Image (cartoon, rainbow, N blue to C red):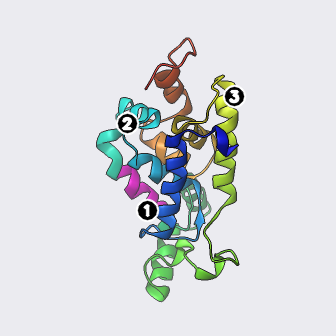
């Protein structure tokens, strides 16, 4: 599958590793959120064009902050947090108590013992699913390659924090398809 990835798509995957290994985003496993963060760093690609066309360029820091907050909540989406609140469970109160006892970011899942036995960062099930979906998205659009735009489209299709944060910022699968392919379905952007 990776032989079908464009340079931009490969750079997104490499960038996701950088977020896990070299930045303060934490974790030992590449997750969909890391792929999204790497996509946000891109310039001059079809994915970055689509994000800019949907007005996300001015709100990148807001997206990053929403991802940090979700990570602080242990990866719970806002919808999951709201559902728990409906049951009388205050997630923010739980996070505050855990952080008071164990330090800020204690629920972020940054335990060192999660690393694969070789000491290498690995892909989590969610990130693998996004990459597999990117292939299906490319095939559905009759594209011969998998670009960063296909990874972006796949992120919007997989329920979870990345899709929720994108949707909260006006980036949905339907909007992206319209920007990237127009109403006729042919490649348009980039």
What residue is shown with label 1?
68
Residue count near mark 1 (Cα–Cα under 10 Å), binned few <14, some 14–19, many ≥20 = some
Does 164 sit above or below residue 139? below
**Residue at left offset 52%, top offset 55%:** 14
Dot 1 or dot 2: first in sequence order is 2
Q: Give percent across and percent down for residue 75.
A: 56, 63
Which of the 4 quarters of the picture holds residue 65?
Answer: bottom left
Q: Which residues are magenta?
A: 62-70
What residue is shown with label 3?
139
Q: Gap in Å between the C-alphas at discs 3 and 1?
A: 33 Å
**Quarter of the image containing the N terminus?**
top right
Residue count near mark 2 (Cα–Cα under 10 Å), binned few <14, some 14–19, many ≥20 = few
Dot 2 or dot 3: first in sequence order is 2
Which of these two is toward me, 104 or 1? 1
| SS type, badge 3 | helix
**Residue at left offset 37%, top offset 36%:** 44
Which of these two is toward me, 73 or 110? 110
| SS type, badge 2 | loop
| SS type, badge 1 | helix
């Amino acid at each position: 599958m990776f032989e079908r990835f464009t340079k931009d798509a490969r750079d997104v995957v490499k960038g996701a590793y950088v977020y896990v290994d070299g930045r303060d985003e934490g974790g030992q496993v590449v997750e969909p959120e890391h792929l999204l963060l790497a996509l946000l760093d891109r310039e001059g690609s079809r994915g970055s064009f689509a994000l800019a066309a949907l007005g996300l360029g001015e709100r990148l820091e807001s997206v990053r902050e929403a991802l940090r907050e979700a990570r602080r909540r242990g990866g719970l989406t806002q919808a999951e947090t709201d559902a728990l609140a409906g049951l009388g469970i205050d997630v923010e109160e739980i996070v505050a108590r855990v952080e008071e006892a164990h330090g800020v970011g204690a629920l972020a899942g940054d335990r060192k013992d999660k690393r694969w036995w070789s000491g290498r960062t690995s892909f989590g099930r969610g990130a693998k699913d996004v990459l597999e979906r990117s292939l299906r998205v490319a095939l559905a659009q009759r594209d011969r390659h998998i670009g960063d735009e296909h990874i972006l489209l796949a992120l919007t299709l997989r329920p979870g924090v990345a899709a929720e944060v994108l949707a909260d910022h006006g980036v949905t699968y339907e909007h992206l398809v319209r920007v990237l392919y127009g109403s006729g379905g042919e490649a348009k952007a980039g």
